[in-house]
Image (spheres, helix red, strand yellow):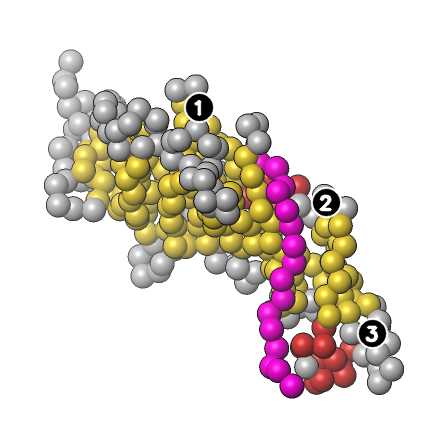
Amino acid sequence: MNPYNSRMAPYWVYHAGESTLYQYPYAYRQPVFSRAIITAARGDVTGDGVADEVFLIGNQTSGSPLWRNITLVIRDGKTHQERQIQLHNNIGYNPSLFLADVTGNQTEDVAVVIDTGGSGGSIYAYVFAYMNRQFRQIFNSDSFNDEFKYSVSYQNQYKASVISQRQHEQYILDLTYKGRDYLNEIYTNQGVLKAPIEGWVNPLSGLYPVDFNRDGVYELLAYQRIAGRYNADSLGYVQTVLKWNGRNFGVDRQNVSIVGGAAT
């Protein structure tokens, strides 16, 4: 058998000193297409006490910051074996990694965040943990967005109501910080709405590891932007603190923040 038969599987090579992962078909022994290392991190993500290497690789669109085929690669620091993890949403901008222990097992977990490029500033986000000798996805933004739903409605007397359907909680926003010109467009002089207005809460737009208790175990702080009459009309942010309970991420607490206006 010809050892360089083109029907055999290709192999991947990292060239020393370069940030490109080359694919070689056995038939030609030369690069036919490349995937760049977008970003890399080091940490013990397998729990064996040896630092592992974690990469995001992908294909960058020519003349654009858009990345395609974004893939998570983990190189075991002890065995040097590599695992590739395919992401459900693998196209986007500014792919990034962070390593932090979010499950409390004294092993760093792997989070991937990718900007979608949409007008709402939403992201794709995934968290992977090493459990039972394999990497398990323990968070993804699609499931989060499906679970956390809201209703937003303007009220009389310059207020807006945000209701978290999952938490069965209501938040009341004071809109006077938006300024007189804004309020005059939608309210009468008596503070009565001229017409009903419904807003919405955007999908996940930020995910950050924060060690609130300073115990070495990180919670996840999730941000969702509240939109008013249109997407650029920001009313504030829903902030949800997620904490691992041994099976999944539960809500530790949730609140709403607003952007301050000029002091009078």
**Cα–Cα gap, marks 3 and 2:** 26 Å
Residue farthest toward the top in the current orientation of the protein: 1
Q: The magenta stretch spans which residues?
A: 249-264
Residue at 70 percent across and 69 percent down: it is: 229
Helix, strand or loop for disc 3 = loop
CA gap between label 1 and label 2 equals 29 Å
Residue receiving disc 1:
131
Above/below status of 167 relative to 122: above
Answer yes or no: do the residues labelled 3 and 2 have beta carbons within 8 Å? no
* Mark 2 crowd level (few <14, some 14–19, many ≥20, 10 Å Cα): few
Vertical placement of residue 118 versus 22, above or below = below
Q: Residues within 10 Å of mark 3 (few under 14, many from 20)?
A: some
Q: Which residue is mark 3?
A: 157
The quarter of the displayed image where residue 249 is located: top right
Residue 22 position in % (x across, y down): 21, 39
**Which residue is at 12% across, 41% downward?**
16
